Image (spheres, rainbow, N blue to C red):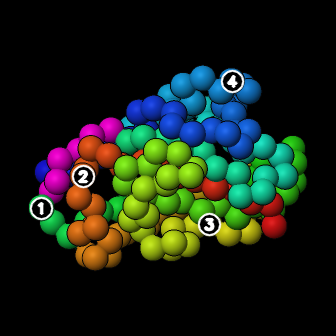
Amino acid sequence: MPQFARPDADTYNGDGWTEDDDNTVDMFLEVDEVTANDADFVRSAVTPTTDAVVFSLTNVTDPALSTGHTLRARNSADPDSQETIDFVFQLRQTYVSEASQGTLINTAGTWQRLGVTSTTWTTTSYTLTGAEADAITDYTALFIRITANKV
């Protein structure tokens, strides 16, 4: 039976990410929907320099499979800043802080969208390899870490 882990709490936002209305409280509520809603979102600061935001994910149970672990995110460039942005997405286990980021599950740099200039919302996805899926030992301690960097 398919399971979906969605953001359920803000974990780290020391790099100036905000909601579409510039709020910074409970930002996960902007990106936790079942069906994507591009009217609410989080955004990096203007001219980001590997700026990070981290959300914990809802608990799911171990599917006892090494296949079918697909990660998805939607993003676009800011029409006001007209900057080119590189986005890197990381699935991490037992993230505590930027100084203690836990275990990187997807191979570094494998889930990314580079050179984003389009203001059209685009879904990007990555399917974990069997070894990456097997690296998950605690499905209740997963986090998504997103970085934005101006090119």
Which residue position holds label 3? 113
Label located before the other in sequence (1 or 3): 1
Mark 3: amino acid: Arg
Please give the residue where the numbered disc 2 appears in the rendered image: 138
Magenta stretch containing residue 59, yes or no?
yes
Which is closer to the viewer, label 1 or label 2?
A: 2
The mark found on residue 23 in the picture is: 4
Helix, strand or loop under label 4: loop
C-alpha separation, residue under disc 4 versus residue under disc 3: 25 Å
Q: Secondary structure at mark 1?
A: loop
Could you tell me what secondary structure mostly forms the magenta stretch? loop
Q: Which residues are magenta?
A: 58-63
The reply to whether residue 120 is visible in this rendering is: no
- Estimate the spatial distance between the alpha carbons at disc 1 and disc 3, rounded to whole Å: 29 Å
Q: Looking at the picture, which amino acid does disc 4 mark? A: Asn
The span from disc 3 to disc 2 (Cα, nearest Å) is: 27 Å
Which one is closest to the eye, mark 1 or mark 3? 1
**Residue 8 appears anywhere in the view:** yes
How packed mark 4 is, by other alpha carbons closer than 10 Å (few <14, some 14-19, many 20 or more), is few
Q: Residue at x 81, y 67 (%)?
A: 151
Q: Amino acid at mark 1?
A: Ala
Q: Which residue is mark 1?
A: 64
Which of discs 4 and 2 lies nearer the camera? The answer is: 2
Q: How far apart in space, not on screen, are marks 1 and 2 (Cα)? A: 12 Å
Residue at 54% across / 59% down in the picture? Answer: 89
What is the C-alpha distance between the residues marked 4 and 1?
39 Å
Within-10-Å neighbours for mark 1: few <14, some 14–19, many 20+ = few
